[in-house]
């Protein structure tokens, strides 16, 4: 057997560069790195040696580097991923939030934080977290709860088992999620005689599980017995590449489709059976259909509470649940009949069994009424008015300047709810991180989308609160020459949560900057801030000015940040559904007591299982 002597870190990088997807691309496209003690000497040297065939990118924050990697994998429909390496200590623990985001969203992410010395000779090393009762624990054990696979590399030969296990998880449609390989810093530098065969190129195929015959028969029986089914399309539709199959299936059998945050833009906005967003941030057209449905077909969705209206949306007393999902855990939720299968394969199988069977077509007027409602809230305000624009009016301006190549994206605060409700998305034109609703994802996520889809017109919608959480990768985008447009809505605080606070009877407190216990008033100059990092930054005085700046931003060679002041109070009243946010049983505030009564009325409507 021929061998080659390499350090464990060198062997890891060489192996990763040889792993391919079915399209012949590197499955791990490259690695984001902030070097420190714990990874600069071992992994850093290995990455330098392979910098031409395996790219290394430098960010400004460990969490946001991982957010970029997550967005890249999402935009690539899980066909490619990125790795992230950090030092030990805070460099590693900064990744934990991103790991949680990847885990919730079932997205592949390879995390390689440095770890303590396996030989323990210099213990405790700088930044080492010592567990007084367990000598095997390090800071990286915090990743165990938010990793689909966790391993600690304590000997150089262990990478020959750990690395294939890592990619097995990342390319498995059911188990897909973040992998953490905690790499002891002394082991990174240790040499081993590795078999040359270990480094031969390997193609990782993403399997398409076929449905079980018994489950398929039960699903077909449920469909044939139904009078008014509805399909709830989730992210699994996109990851399966089932968009065309869903469009054809819905049209063939006259089944309305409603979209979750992850499933939005799986169907083109103009598809006749696309009845819009569902649930708490949903359209009236979608929610009316769901309220009366006697069969709710979850297609690649995990039925998050925003989708189900906290399980108070599906009101038909005869309704049944059918969950089609590649992950058995998701398929069995809430007493649903399970069809464990790839989404595309399942639709094709159901289509064959249904033949020419058609249901009564849903009322097309519901769609028309919803389009009319959204057009009204997105319309430009009266030029004579002096009021600040709403977020919906800002979205309207972006919509009017967008094209079929536009991808609008966001993550937290007001924007996910407003965009889910009222953005008219072409197929593939919507990217929202709402599984974890992670503030600070937006700027970094826009980089990942643009790296995955360089021809797309990427528009990042972010509020001032989320921008302040994590904005440093704007400088990274400038230095890497990655252009996209940022629309920064400044409502001077956390407007979304302020509305939720008051909606549950609370007094406005600690959300808007003026309601916090500050000594000096806020005077943040976002234009100057973004400009200081090298972005092109401008202030739009009103909606007309915003539209002009959006046009001027097209074709830029670097990020463009357009700041506009907005009113924190309004949100789109049309559509939507109740959401279970527990209201205190006891309070001195009359507003809370009133909200509690309404809350008790609504929780009585929940149906948690069939």
Image: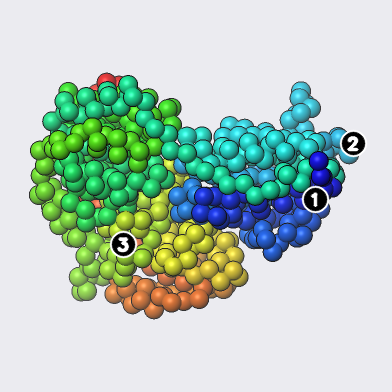
- Which circle marks residue 72 in the picture? none
Q: Identify the element where label 1 is drawn.
A: helix
Q: Does residue 64 appear anywhere in the picture?
A: no
Query: In the image, 500: left or right of 422?
Result: right
Q: Which residue is mark 1?
A: 42
Pick the residue in front: 43 or 193.
Answer: 193
Q: Position of residue 610 (x, y in %)?
A: 27, 21
**Residue at the disc numbered 3:** 395
Which corner quadrant holds the N terminus?
Answer: top right
Disc 2 to disc 1, how far (Cα)?
17 Å
Q: CA distance from mark 2 to mark 3?
A: 58 Å
Disc nearest the viewer among 1 and 3: 1
Circles 2 and 1: CB distance less than 8 Å? Answer: no
Front residue of 72 and 38: 72
- SS of the residue under disc 2: loop
Residue drawn 21% across the image and 53% down it: 271
Crowd tier of the residue under label 1, counting other residues whose Cα lies within 10 Å: few below 14, some 14–19, many 20 or above: many
Coordinates of residue 609 in the picture (x, y in percent): 30, 21
User: What x and y, as percent, mark residue 541?
Assistant: 35, 74
Q: Are marks 2 and 3 in contact (CB under 8 Å)?
A: no
Q: Quadrant of residue 184?
A: top right
Residue ID for mark 2? 121
């Amino acid at each position: 057997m021929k061998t080659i002597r390499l350090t464990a870190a060198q062997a890891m990088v060489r192996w990763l560069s040889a792993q391919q997807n079915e399209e012949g691309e590197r499955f791990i496209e490259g690695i984001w790195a902030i070097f420190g003690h714990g990874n600069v000497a071992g992994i850093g040297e290995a990455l330098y040696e392979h910098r031409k065939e395996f790219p290394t990118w430098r960010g400004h924050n460990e969490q946001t580097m991982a957010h970029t990697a997550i967005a890249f994998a999402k935009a690539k429909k899980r066909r490619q991923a990125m790795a992230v390496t950090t030092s030990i200590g805070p460099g590693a623990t900064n990744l934990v939030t991103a790991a949680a985001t990847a885990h919730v969203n079932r997205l592949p992410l390879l995390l390689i934080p440095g770890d303590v010395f396996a030989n323990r000779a210099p213990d405790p090393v700088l930044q080492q977290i010592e567990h007084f009762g367990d000598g095997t624990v390090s800071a990286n054990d915090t990743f165990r709860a938010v990793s689909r696979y966790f391993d600690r590399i304590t000997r150089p030969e262990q990478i020959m088992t750990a690395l294939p296990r890592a990619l097995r998880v990342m390319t498995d449609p059911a188990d897909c999620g973040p992998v953490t390989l905690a790499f002891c810093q002394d082991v990174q530098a240790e040499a081993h005689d590795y078999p040359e065969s270990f480094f031969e190129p390997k193609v990782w195929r993403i399997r398409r599980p076929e449905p079980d015959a018994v489950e398929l028969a039960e699903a077909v029986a449920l469909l044939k017995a139904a009078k008014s089914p509805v399909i709830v399309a989730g992210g699994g539709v996109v990851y399966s590449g089932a968009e065309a199959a869903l469009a054809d299936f819905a049209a063939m059998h006259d089944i309305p489709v409603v979209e979750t945050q992850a499933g939005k833009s799986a169907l083109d906005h103009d598809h006749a059976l696309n009845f819009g967003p569902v649930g708490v941030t949903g359209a009236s057209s979608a929610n009316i259909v769901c309220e009366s449905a006697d069969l709710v077909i979850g297609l690649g969705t995990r039925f998050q509470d925003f989708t189900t209206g906290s399980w108070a949306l599906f009101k038909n007393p005869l309704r049944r649940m059918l969950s089609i999902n590649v992950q058995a855990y998701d398929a069995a939720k809430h007493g649903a009949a399970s069809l464990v299968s790839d989404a595309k394969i399942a639709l094709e199988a159901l289509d064959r069994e249904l033949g020419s069977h058609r249901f009564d077509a849903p009322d097309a007027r519901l769609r028309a009424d919803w389009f009319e409602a959204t057009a009204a809230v997105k319309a430009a305000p009266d030029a004579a008015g002096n009021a600040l624009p709403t977020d919906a009016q800002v979205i309207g301006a972006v919509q009017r300047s967008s094209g079929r190549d536009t991808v609008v994206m966001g993550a937290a605060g007001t924007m996910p709810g407003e965009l889910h409700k009222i953005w008219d998305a072409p197929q593939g034109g919507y990217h929202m991180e709402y599984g974890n609703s992670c503030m600070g994802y937006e700027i970094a996520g826009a980089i990942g989308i643009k790296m995955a889809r360089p021809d797309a017109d990427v528009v990042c919608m972010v509020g001032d609160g989320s921008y302040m959480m994590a904005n440093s990768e704007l400088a990274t985008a400038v230095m890497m020459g990655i252009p996209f447009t940022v629309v920064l809505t400044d409502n001077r605080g956390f407007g979304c949560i302020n509305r939720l606070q008051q909606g549950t009877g609370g007094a406005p407190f600690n959300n808007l900057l003026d309601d916090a216990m500050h000594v000096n008033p806020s005077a943040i100059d976002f234009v100057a801030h973004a400009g200081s990092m090298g972005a092109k930054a401008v202030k739009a005085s009103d909606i007309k000015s915003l539209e002009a700046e959006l046009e001027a931003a097209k074709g830029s060679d670097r990020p463009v940040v357009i700041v506009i002041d907005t009113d924190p109070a309004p949100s789109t009243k049309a559509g939507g559904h109740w959401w279970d946010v527990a209201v205190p049983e006891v309070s001195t505030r009359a507003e809370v007591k009133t909200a509690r009564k309404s809350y008790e009325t609504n929780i009585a409507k929940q149906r948690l299982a069939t």
